[in-house]
Amino acid sequence: MHIKPFQEFAKDKIGVAGLVLILFLFTTAILAPVIAPHDPWDYSASSFQQPSKEHLLGTNDIGYDIFSELLWSLRTSILFGIAVAAITCTLGLVLGVSAALIGGMYDMLVMRLADALLAIPTIMILILIAAYFKPSTTVLIIALSLVLWQTIARGVRAQTLSLKTKLYVKAANNMGAPTSYIMYKHIMPELFPLYAMGFVTKARIAVFMEAGLSFLGIFDPTTKSLGIMMSYAMRYLYLDVWFNWLLPPVFALSLLIVSLGLISYAIEEIFDPRLRRNNATPI
Amino acid sequence: MRRILIASVIALVIVICLLTPAISADSESVGREVRIADKAGDWGHSSPYLTYSRGPGYLRMHFIFDTLVWKNETAGPIPLLAENWEYVAEENAYVFNLAENAKWHDGEPVTADDVAFTISYMKEHPYGWVVLDSVDRGEVIDPHTVKIYMGSPYAPFIADIGGTMPILPEHIWKDVANPKDFVEDGAFIGCGPFKYADFSKEHGTYRYEAFDDYYLGRPIVDRLIYMKAGDPQMALQHGEVDFADVKPDMVDTMRERGFVVIAGPHYWNKKLMINHDKAPLDNIVFRQALAYAINQSEFVEKSLRGHGTPASYGLISSESVWASPNVPDYPYNPDKAKEMISTLGYVWEDGVFTKDGKPLELQVLVSMIGTGGQPAPDRDGKILKIQLEKVGIQIDLTSLDTKVVDTKVINRDFDLAISGHGFLGGDPKMLYDMTMQVPGTKTSPNTAQYNKSEELNEFLNGLMHEMDPEKRCAAVYEAQNVYARELPAISLYYPTWYYAYNPDAGVEWFYTTGGTAKGIPIPQNKLALIGGGDSAGVETTETAETETETTAMSAPIMPGLAMIAILIAFAIVQMKRSNRKP
């Protein structure tokens, strides 16, 4: 490593803002069961209540407390984002590194598969899967991860190929270090920027996809989701419910996506030498 | 200066000349018109074989083509093209006497030949809305009397065929080999109250002009227009249309704003489809336990916010004239449901029923099911899940595309599915169609495909073939009672639909008893546009005359204004000239 990423990040105001936002949303989501004033599946309240002390954002058409629903939906979104990002990064890393190290036929197969996946629009595949099979959250997480790994794998492979030729790697190799040691000690740390950025970017895409799919009504209907909230709120817009029903999930989703965007922007600036500012701390 | 002045005078004259004919032409054509909003817009050409085979498509066509009999707000069947009719039991035939002054839109008279022709033509070229298998032939007795022979007794004849089959003009259709490709002007010649004027597939608009020689009298409006509107209710509020469907939550607001809101009768049900081929749903006791576990009122209160009523378990709407007075009922009783389930060998363990160590789990398919092809919000799956889990049945709620759910129901690849359909107020033939799977016909996703009850089959056959009205009625009642006892499917509730119209437009729209034609639950009946000698008709005719007068008066104003403008312009020019001379 030639830079101290955490120090750099701490200096980046945009990145810190994103981090603070995401930590705030994250805490809210984790604490949802504690903070939420009502059970989000309890429809015993009367419908279309205006915001009050009892129901901070009022109630919706069936009598759900909108504020509680919002907190639980945020939880679904964040969980979905993290899960997809984690699986995608692992897949991308494993496939990318192995393709670079093994090479040959295997390399070609993995990379052509990645190219093919790049060409197919992800959302179409997901809509098809969701419409014809039982779209439980787990199935969708796996499905989305299976179609999102390609960009990470390509980056990782290219970087690994270039690292393979580095003198210190060759030196370690000549001194008899096993491949696993070289992987762990020399290659993985160098790839950190790639998967740190991949993680944030993919989480952002996943959060957005989840909201989109549930908005279209093809997500698991029993989960709470920002998209489902929006889609229902849209149907009752004529009742002037936009400020307490439509706006909160839209705002929460935007905040989530913006904060992830800010973080990925900051990470990119730190690690990409072309974007790095002059005040970067050299070692 | 002078040039500029002359140029501007010429420009002014040109502009006025251009405007004048346009405005006066427009004013001449302004008559009474009624505009109806529709969300989908395009429902196909307004000719029997060209409309889309859904209710709104049929309604676009029914303004142009008349049937033998018809229905109004309170009664049906009532005379339309046929002034009267009778059933001749010995010959198993109906004799219809046609209105003698009826004419086709091209001026030819409507005769018995046209009716006989329509039957033979539709037997040869099947028409989706009418199944003529039970009809043998039509025979012309005299130019205005026709006798229709049936092959076998067919009790729903009047409602199902007489009130739904549009009569075609023989002189136009006799040469048409392929009716689905026939889109020439002749395809839109009927004998109904309105003539076809225009249709735009892209814009989803329809225009009909009043038919002056209509045998029941000229319609009270000159023009009828269907417009596509993204939000019909908004279009009505903004005065772009006179008639539109409105959302239940807006009913009070619309009334406050001076619109007349009509609430529909309950002829559409949300229905829980049950796979009665699969254990434990194949057991009648289990299905009855489900009925006890389901709280219909909670669906009405939560899913519809009170805009609806709980459904009858006998499928036929409790508001229909055919509703049985003693349909078995299943008042909400979760304890009784639990008790019934435990008699089937299930053991209650920590809030869930189990058998042989396996929990009792059922899958419920839900989709965005709506009416008229317009998806509606669905909260029912979640409510059903909570209700059934209270009685120890674990529910796996699966949301799929409507078409996928339909296919799974048709192929019996499901446990429970929430679906829905209309026609509950029409002829009780519907009960037969929605229960039995008639061999050789295309399976509908709404039919329960339930043929295993001998008793039910007998009553269903009775209601189809019993020509004696009293005996038929008894069969209809019994069929409902057995249906409600065996529960091949469970009707959940009837939503209330609302339409609102602008009373200033002069048309009093109404919901047809049992639904328009076969049972279309949309309050667009051509009879609302035909005066029929009531006070509304007289009033509107007067207004129409006054409007025509104002139009006639306003027409010469524009050329007059143009003349004055020219004269003033010349006067200014002359004044300028005389000012310069000295």
Image: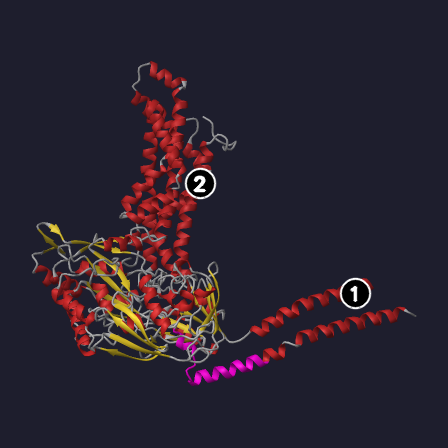
Does the stretch in magenta take in A218? no
Q: Quadrant of the C terminus of chain A?
A: top left
Chain bearing tag 1 is: B
Q: Check disc 2 and report the residue beneath it.
A: A15
Q: Amino acid at mark 1?
A: Ile
Residue visible at 48% across and 81% down in the picture:
B540
Asked whether, in this view, residue B69 is left or right of residue A17, the answer is: left
- What are the residue bounds of the magenta stretch? B525-549
Does the stretch in magenta take in B542? yes
Q: Check disc 2: other Cα within 10 Å, few if <14, some if 14-19, many if 20+.
A: many
Q: Quadrant of the N terminus of chain A?
A: top left
Answer yes or no: do the residues labelled 1 and 2 have beta carbons within 8 Å? Answer: no
**Front of the two marks 1 and 2:** 1
Rounded to the nearest angstrom, the CA distance separating label 1 from label 2 is 70 Å
Q: Amino acid at mark 2?
A: Gly
Query: Residue B502 lies in what quarter of the image?
Result: bottom left
Disc marking residue B6:
1
List x then y, in percent, for residue B309. Answer: 27, 71
